[in-house]
């Protein structure tokens, strides 16, 4: 166990990074530390919740008690929480029992732990500066406790279970289904007379933390949900979510879950038959946990469309998937060999993620490279499918790699704003700037109000109509132009001919731009007549990939004249921030009036 913990710490430290979004949390902490409260912009700007509550409270406490600022504290705390997850899993995996009720040999549990600790997604999200590890830890404990519920439930077990659900919600609103399931199971146990009403009420007391936080959020921010929900969730996007999950399954060996689960279901149906409904009824907490995990994954895959970060919202499925497969395999046979083989197979299958990581660590390539030209021919049918999905997702800002985020932070933020900036003598009391990727800028420029163009920290932009991109018309026009671009009439389009079609819509930016870069990567994946040639049909598939209809978490944009109303007056050049004088000085009353007017416009829309 010491060796596994050491590997986990070392692996997480080697993969550690801080993304721009992490600095959004850090700015909230800085404002709280300065006495302004958990706000993005200090008063007179109205409070907006674009942060994770529990994560900012933890970082604020560390800064206040020990003097360690959030950028230095975030990753060590996350890695420590990852180690807690390893210990929780070890406690369960080393006590598993097989079909006969006998304890499985320790080698089974250790093999499963090696598969989890060796998984790059698991290690990767032990850092990042976000609240991922803080949310995953109590949620993992909540699921494990659901399966270890005693036959006669008592207040102590329910209190622990409720506490895990409450901490998950305080970390991220994603935990609300776990709270709802906890309340429902407590009521069911009372109705089944397997728990006294008094014990249920006492055990559910930790859930009052959730109620108190919801009331406080409504009072302080004026909303029941964080502002980021309104900014990010535009409309259902299963086309992106299914690709996101497909790539996750390939990289993390999750495709093995389904045949193992099918075998287990078949064995259980043959063995137990009509007894299964009764087993599910008696194991209601476990059933509820499975439904919550499934609902959470389905919500992000089918509704949200995945996530801006690679597999962040699915990272908790890695340890749960390994554990579930080992248990299901153990239920299928009296031998320990099948569960150990299941764990080993999942570990080996997840090495695809390490292969991808090793072949795409070129910081000059926008965090993206195709695997197909770099692998043996036997693997190319798989990698060709994977590369196409990655190009589709990358061009829509879905599942962007952590290595890419680290490169962006180094190449852009750290080079442009290497040190904290101050405006010592502003021409009026309210210097204002605006930007799109504003996390690191907001941390380095803390005494300036910053307008977030994508609405993560802006009430008005988060609720404004999202950008409409007429991708259908663009696709139809480009498809119609393809035959005419085949100048030599040989049925094959060269890259040069294809670029002529796409020049106005996609690749018309300077050479080296992301669009031209994507075209250069994508074309060989669709080529059927050599590296420099595509059939008209294949070119049509390529157009469908490169024509962008949505961008994850970047679909909101300020309504006309909204930003101008605040008269932004701060510019940054060479790491120096300068505020210019306004023709009409900005005042606190004017800021309040602008916000009130625009909020009223959106409410009346």
Image (tube, rainbow, N blue to C red):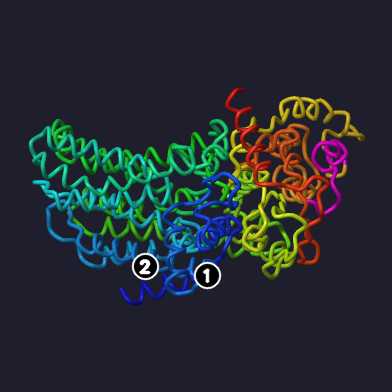
Crowd around label 1: few <14 · some 14–19 · many ≥20 (10 Å) = some
**Residue 2's mark?**
none
Q: Residue 444, image x and y in percent?
A: 65, 64
Q: Residue 516, image x and y in percent?
A: 80, 48
**Residue 83's mark?**
2
Q: Is residue 168 toward the left or the right of residue 188 in the image?
A: right
Q: Is residue 504 magenta?
A: yes
Who is closer to the viewer here, 477 or 443?
A: 443
Numbered marks: total: 2
Residue located 51% across and 51% down the image? 51
**Which structural element holds mark 1?**
loop
Comes first in the chain, label 1 or label 2: 1
Who is closer to the viewer here, 350 or 290?
A: 290
- Residue 349 visible to an observer of this rendering: no
Majority secondary structure in the magenta region: loop
**Residue 69's mark?**
1
Q: Is residue 258 magenta?
A: no
Q: Is residue 158 toward the left or the right of residue 61 in the image?
A: left
**Which structural element holds mark 2?**
helix
Q: Residue 112, image x and y in percent?
A: 32, 61
Q: Is residue 175 toward the left or the right of residue 564 in the image?
A: left
* Magenta residues (range): 497-513
Q: Is residue 133 above or below residue 76?
A: above
Crowd around label 2: few <14 · some 14–19 · many ≥20 (10 Å) = many
Q: Image quadrant of residue 266? A: top left
Q: Image quadrant of residue 377? A: bottom right
Q: Image quadrant of residue 445? A: bottom right
């Amino acid at each position: 166990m010491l060796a596994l913990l050491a590997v986990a710490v070392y692996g997480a430290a080697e993969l550690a990074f801080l993304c721009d979004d992490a600095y959004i949390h850090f700015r909230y902490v800085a404002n709280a530390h300065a006495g302004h409260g958990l706000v993005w912009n200090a008063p007179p700007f109205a409070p907006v919740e674009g942060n994770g509550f529990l994560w900012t409270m933890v970082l604020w406490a560390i800064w206040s008690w020990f003097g360690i600022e959030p950028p230095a504290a975030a990753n060590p705390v996350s890695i420590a929480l990852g180690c807690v997850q390893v210990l929780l899993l070890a406690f369960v995996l080393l006590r598993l029992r097989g079909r006969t009720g006998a304890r499985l040999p320790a080698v089974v549990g250790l093999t499963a732990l090696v598969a989890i600790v060796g998984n790059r997604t698991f290690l990767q999200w032990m850092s990042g500066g976000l609240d991922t590890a803080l949310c995953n830890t109590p949620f993992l404990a909540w699921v494990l406790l659901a399966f270890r519920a005693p036959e006669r439930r008592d207040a102590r077990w329910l209190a622990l279970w409720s506490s895990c659900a409450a901490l998950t919600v305080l970390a991220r609103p994603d935990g609300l289904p776990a709270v709802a399931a906890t309340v429902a199971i407590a009521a069911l146990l009372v109705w089944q007379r397997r728990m006294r009403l008094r014990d249920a009420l006492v055990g559910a007391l930790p859930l009052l933390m959730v109620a108190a936080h919801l009331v406080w959020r409504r009072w302080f921010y004026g909303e029941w949900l964080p502002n980021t929900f309104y900014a990010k969730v535009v409309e259902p996007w299963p086309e992106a979510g299914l690709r996101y999950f497909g790539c996750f399954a390939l990289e993390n060996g999750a495709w093995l879950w389904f045949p193992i689960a099918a075998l287990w279901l078949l064995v259980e149906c043959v063995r137990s038959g009509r007894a299964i409904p009764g087993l599910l009824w008696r194991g209601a907490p476990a059933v509820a946990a499975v439904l919550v995990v499934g609902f959470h994954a389905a919500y992000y895959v089918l509704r949200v469309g995945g996530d801006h970060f690679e597999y962040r919202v699915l990272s908790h499925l890695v340890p749960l998937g390994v554990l579930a497969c080992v248990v299901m395999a153990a239920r299928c046979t009296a031998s320990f060999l099948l569960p150990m083989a299941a764990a080993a197979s999942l570990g080996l299958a997840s090495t695809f993620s390490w292969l991808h990581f090793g072949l795409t660590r070129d910081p000059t390539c926008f965090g993206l490279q195709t695997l197909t030209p770099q692998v043996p021919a036997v693997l190319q049918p798989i990698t060709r499918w994977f590369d196409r999905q990655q190009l589709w997702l990358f061009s829509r800002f879905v599942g962007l790699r952590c290595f890419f985020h680290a490169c962006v932070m180094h190449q852009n933020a750290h080079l442009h704003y290497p040190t904290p900036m101050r405006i010592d003598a502003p021409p009026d009391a309210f210097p204002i700037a605006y930007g799109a990727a504003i996390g690191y800028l907001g941390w380095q420029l803390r005494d300036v109000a910053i307008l977030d163009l994508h609405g993560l920290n802006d009430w008005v932009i988060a609720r404004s109509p999202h950008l409409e991109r007429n991708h259908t018309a663009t696709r139809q026009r480009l498809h119609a132009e393809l035959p005419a671009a085949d100048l030599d009439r040989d049925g094959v389009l060269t890259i040069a001919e294809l670029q002529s079609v796409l020049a106005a819509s996609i690749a018309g930016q300077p050479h080296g731009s992301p669009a031209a870069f994507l075209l250069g990567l994508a074309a060989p994946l669709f080529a059927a007549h050599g590296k420099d040639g595509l059939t008209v049909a294949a070119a049509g598939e390529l157009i469908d990939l490169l024509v962008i209809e949505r961008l994850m978490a970047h679909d909101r944009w300020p309504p006309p004249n909204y930003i101008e109303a605040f008269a932004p007056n701060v510019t940054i050049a060479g790491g120096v921030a300068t505020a210019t004088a306004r023709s009409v000085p900005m005042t606190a009353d004017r800021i309040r009036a602008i916000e009130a007017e625009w909020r009223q416009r959106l409410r009346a829309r």
